[in-house]
Amino acid sequence: MLFHLDAGHAGRDAKGNPVTPGKRTPDGSMLEWEFNSKVAEYVEAELKNYQNVSVKRADDRTGRTDVSLSERVNRANRDKASVFVSIHANAYGSGWNSANGIETFVYTSKPKEAVKLANAVQNHMVKDTGRTNRGVKTAGFYVLKYTNMTAILCECGFMTSREEAALLKSDSYRRKIAHAIVKGLVECYGLKAIKKESETPKPSPQGKVFYRVVTGSFINRENSNDRMKELKQKGFDSFLDAFEKGGKTYFRCVTGSFASRKNAENRMAALDKVGFDSFLESYKK
Ligand SMILES: [Zn+2]
């Protein structure tokens, strides 16, 4: 399924000037987009760990242009996205004040799936950050009204709160919020993690079992060579396999090595017919 992430507003133009008027902390130390876009980046990166998921951005990820709200909506509608998540930081007035906490919005018609997703995301955000729960609310925001798919808008803390502004600027808070959004999506849509390489049992060359037919094991190398000659006379090629056990070296006469147990047993039967006892030894290679 396709998720459209929408980092609210925009960053700086080529000259380094803020593109969106307002939308920053009262001291100008952080643009809202800096928070929004980082969270969107982290959400996108994390969603890549899930099966059958693709992610697009409705905003301009370079931050250089403030994509209009109608264009953001058009992008998601045109791509037939399944879910639209708009990421924002809140503000109350323009100076520092005590308004704080996290809230998530759905459209005023309270679409069922959006309410479910909003609740899941809101709960994770509040639980993971310990911030005030302002709840799931309704609003007629453009991106909620005109998107054809399930859409939510997250307000992840107040830029006008000194305490929350510091959090919004911190990488750990941004990651927490992103992780909470992903958890909400995973929960609502039953997303399955992509199995990591190490968890996938793959047939390694080390794991393949072979069977060798041993037609005698000797302490004396000469005896082993004699056995190989006898076998040769009966039409069986063998090789010598020396191995250490309990400080002694044993010389084994191996008359065939097989990937299939059945073939190894056939060889044993053939050896038995001409008077050689043998035993089967399996090993991994
Ligand atoms: Zn915003």
Image (spheres, grey):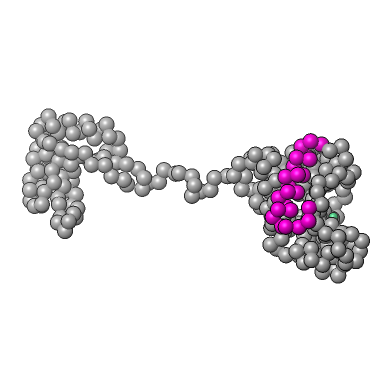
Give the image location of residue 218, x and y in percent: 11, 48
Q: Is residue 40 visible?
A: no
Vertically, is 32 above or below 281? below
Give the image location of residue 12, x and y in percent: 83, 63
Q: Is residue 220 visible?
A: yes
Q: Is residue 114 magenta?
A: yes
The residue at 79%/36% (across/down) is 112
Give the image location of residue 20, x and y in percent: 88, 59
Quarter-wise, where is residue 113 in the image? top right
Characterize the magenta stretch by its predominant secondary structure: helix
The front one of 83 and 161 is 161
Task: State the extent of the magenta-drawn residues as a range.
Answer: 111-133
Vertically, is 285 above or below 132? above
Residue closest to the far right: 93
The residue at 7%/45% (across/down) is 226
Left/right of residue 254 with respect to residue 173 in the rendered view: left
Vertically, is 44 above or below 268? below
The residue at 45%/44% (across/down) is 201
